[in-house]
Image (cartoon, grey):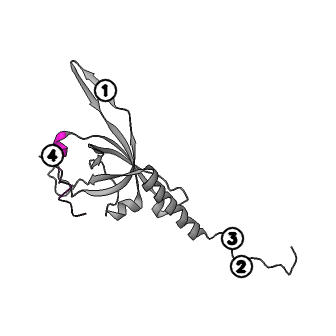
Amino acid sequence: MSKNSTRPSRAFFDFAKDRAYIHSLNLEMQETVSGTFCFYWAHDESQTTVDELYNETIGAKVYRAPVKIWAAVEYKEQEEEASGALVERKKSIGLKFFRPHLRDVQLTEPKSGDIIQAGNDYYEVVKVTESDPLLGDLEDMHTFSCSCEQARPYDISALPSVAASSR
């Protein structure tokens, strides 16, 4: 290169702008390609009565009003468990939430014991794992993966109705 040629004063790529673009693509892909709306009931531990000795719920669990949230849903194969003449069928799903979607509905993170309606079925969150971000330590790139099992009928009966929700 000759001394008279002009060099760009900054890099060809603007990292902050590129990061924002990739972030918007990730959100759009989750929402339009792989995502679906779910209703989410967060377990309200402060309002639920718990036995101090056994650490079990006394009566019904108390849940907050439901919120509508985007999630990537992975339906898993239905399991059958036979005991004598009874055959029990268990449904389970995997869910992934992006942190910005949780923040939009004022949730910090999913927790074990929360209830989710995906389609016509209700599921209880049994395990939550937080994934590492894709591009280094970026706050909004975290996802939460939830393993969920079909909820018991008495847990569903305690849920506030979707129609009563103000969100």
Image disc number at residue 9: 2
* Residue located beneath label 3 in the image: 12
Which secondary structure, mark 2?
loop
- Give whichever of discs 4 and 3 has the lower sequence position: 3
Tell me how far mark 4 sits from mark 1, CA to CA: 24 Å
Q: Is 15 part of what is drawn in magenta?
A: no
Q: Quadrant of residue 83?
A: top left
What residue lies at 54% left-to-right and 65% top-to-bottom?
21
Q: Position of residue 98 (x, y in %)?
A: 42, 57
Tell me how far mark 4 sits from mark 3, CA to CA: 58 Å
Q: Residue furthest left?
A: 59
Range covered by the magenta-colored residues: 153-167
Relative horizontal placement of residue 114, taking residue 95 as reference (left or right) = left
**Type of amino acid under label 4:** Ser
Within-10-Å neighbours for mark 4: few <14, some 14–19, many 20+? few
- Give whichever of discs 2 and 4 has the lower sequence position: 2
* Residue located beneath label 1 in the image: 80
Quadrant the C terminus occupies: bottom left
- Kindly indicate whether the residue at mark 1 contacts the one at mark 4 (C-beta within 8 angstroms): no
Which secondary structure, mark 1?
strand
Q: Position of residue 12 (x, y in %)?
A: 68, 70
Which secondary structure, mark 3?
loop
**Type of amino acid under label 3:** Phe
- Give whichever of discs 2 and 1 has the lower sequence position: 2
- Give whichever of discs 4 and 1 has the lower sequence position: 1
* Residue located beneath label 4 in the image: 157
Question: Is residue 22 positioned above or below 122 on the image?
Answer: below
What residue lies at 36% left-to-right and 60% top-to-bottom?
102
